[in-house]
Image (cartoon, helix red, strand yellow):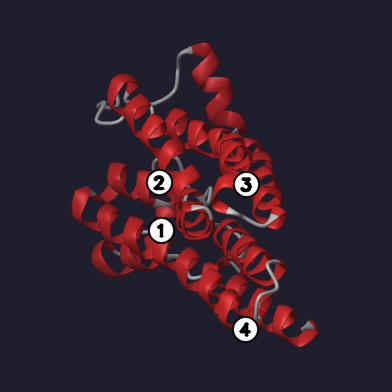
Amino acid sequence: MGLALLVSISIGYLLGSISFSYLIGKKLLKLDIRTMGSKSAGATNTLRVMGKGPAISVLVLDIAKGIVAVWLGVILGDGNAWVPTLAGLAAILGHNWPIYFGFRGGKGVATTIGVIATLVLFPALLAGVIAIGSIFVTRYVSLGSLLFVVLTPLSTWLLMNYYDYPIEYFYLTVAVALLSLWKHRTNIQRLLTGTENKLGAKKA
């Protein structure tokens, strides 16, 4: 099991380290997404800098990284919940600090969605509906992202016995929430001061 865990974590991290926003930016527009907009290598900044098409591609591919990492852990873990849990976490860490791109990545929201939705689908759906609703109402993508990661541990805890989720999955949701809060610390500050960028807003 130790070897399976090591392999799953290693592949999960390397898979998560593939920065699709960076690669698509270089391929399409010959730009480094990390030097433009919010300087984050993720789907939201891709939308601001490159538009809807590239942003949707990045979103889908980043979510897929998390899904593949978790399922690899499920296959190799042979029933040990820690293996897919830590493989998923490794994919998120890889996205945030990619080894291929000087450890400069994004905030890991899309990859987190892939990981969390694969492990705890119904709690993630509940948190996701509220998060998406908040984005529609406020047009703050960061607020929706924060609501998703904060509400997922709560919904997982409430539904854990009903769906028989392992406690390891709950631990992951808490760890991911804390990580995401730290990665979004500047967004939180801007939300509190009313200076956060809104979705679709034109820069002055």
What amino acid type should be assigned to the residue bearing mark 1? Asp
| SS for callout 3 | helix
Q: Nearer the viewer, residue 197 or 62?
A: 62
Q: Residue at x 25, y 51 (%)?
A: 50
Say the numbered circle drawn on residue 36.
Answer: 2
Name the image quarter holding residue 76: bottom right
Which residue position holds label 3? 161
| SS for callout 1 | loop
In the displayed structure, would residue 180 be above or below residue 58? above
Q: In the drawing, does residue 60 fall left or right of residue 2? A: left
Q: Nearer the viewer, mark 3 or mark 2?
A: 3
Q: Nearer the viewer, residue 124 or 122?
A: 122
Within 10 Å of disc 2 (Cα), the crowding (few <14, some 14-19, many 20+) is: some
Q: Earlier in the sequence, mark 3 or mark 1?
A: 1
Q: Nearer the viewer, mark 3 or mark 1?
A: 3
Which residue position holds label 4? 76
C-alpha gap between disc 1 and disc 2: 7 Å
Within 10 Å of disc 4 (Cα), the crowding (few <14, some 14-19, many 20+) is: some
Q: Are marks 1 and 2 in contact (CB under 8 Å)?
A: yes
C-alpha gap between disc 4 and disc 3: 25 Å
Which residue position holds label 1? 32
Give the x, y percent position of residue 39.
47, 45
Q: Earlier in the sequence, mark 4 or mark 3?
A: 4
Quadrant housing the N terminus = bottom right
What amino acid type should be assigned to the residue bearing mark 2? Met
Q: Residue at x 47, y 73 (%)?
A: 68
Give the x, y percent position of residue 85.
65, 63
| SS for callout 4 | helix
In the displayed structure, would residue 102 be above or below residue 157? below
Q: Are marks 1 and 4 in contact (CB under 8 Å)?
A: no
Q: Residue at x 45, y 33 (%)?
A: 142
Within 10 Å of disc 3 (Cα), the crowding (few <14, some 14-19, many 20+) is: few
